[in-house]
Image (cartoon, rainbow, N blue to C red):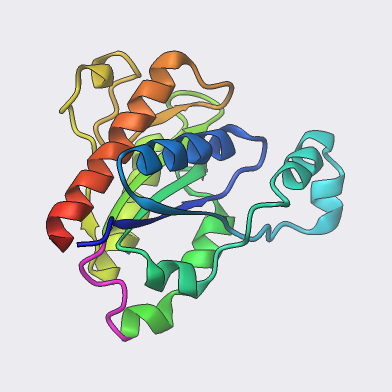
Amino acid sequence: MANPKITVLFYSTYGTNHAVAQQVASAAEEAGAEVRLRRVRETAPDDVVNGQDAWKAQLEKMSDIPEASLDDMEWADGFFVSAPTRFGVVASQMRAFFDTLGPLWQEGKLDGKTLTASTSSNTLHGGQETTFLSIYLSAMHWGCIVVSPGYGNAVKFEDGGNPYGFSKAAGELTDTDRTSIAYQARRLVDATAKLRG
């Protein structure tokens, strides 16, 4: 069978989830997957984005990455979703993209695909676990198979210990963070390959 196809789908305001997505894409490719790195469209008004230099700079930094489409979701065998936590749920930009997936869901074109997720927030306890649940509930509606990292690798006891997926307070990635992200990406690729085998 061909290598599993993974869409790495992310939204990032200030850069944390962009960095996570890049690490995921690299690790998934190393694990043998064919990867599409895709960002979801910015839905905040231009005056809000342009009113914050860091937000505006991050949007410009990602401008070479294609925006996610329905084709990217239909193409993939599995998904790695990375987006910030906002008030205990996934950021509205990711939610807005999810809301466009009705046609694929109705035709069963997301059914049986794998999905795992990552998130960040300003504080370690800023609603990260409920954000995972908000993502995974959507995935279950689509018929996806959730591939959480659990505690299958010792790094999960070093990275903050979230069994739902990699999560962190927003900021630069550490070596431990990168190891944890790579583990989760490999786990997704392996699970997807077994299901497609």
Determine the main secondary structure of the stretch shown in magenta.
loop
Q: Residue 38: where, in percent of width, then height?
A: 54, 55
Which residue is at a point 45% across and 43% down the rendered structure image? 25
Q: Nearer the viewer, residue 176 or 168?
A: 176
Magenta stretch bounds: 107-113
Viewer-side residue, 24 vs 121 = 24
The relative height of residue 170 versus residue 134 in the rendered view (above or below) is above
Q: Residue at x 27, y 81 (%)?
A: 108
- Residue nearest the observer in this picture, 141 or 30: 30
Q: From what the image shows, is residue 93 above or below residue 52?
A: below
Who's the residue at 36% across and 64% down the image? 76
Q: Is residue 18 above or below residue 170?
A: below
Q: Position of residue 105 (x, y in %)?
A: 34, 78
Q: Is residue 125 magenta?
A: no
Quadrant of res 103? bottom left
- Looking at the rendered image, the quarter that the C terminus falls into is bottom left
Looking at the rendered image, the quarter that the N terminus falls into is: bottom left
User: Is 37 placed left or right of 131 in the picture?
Assistant: right
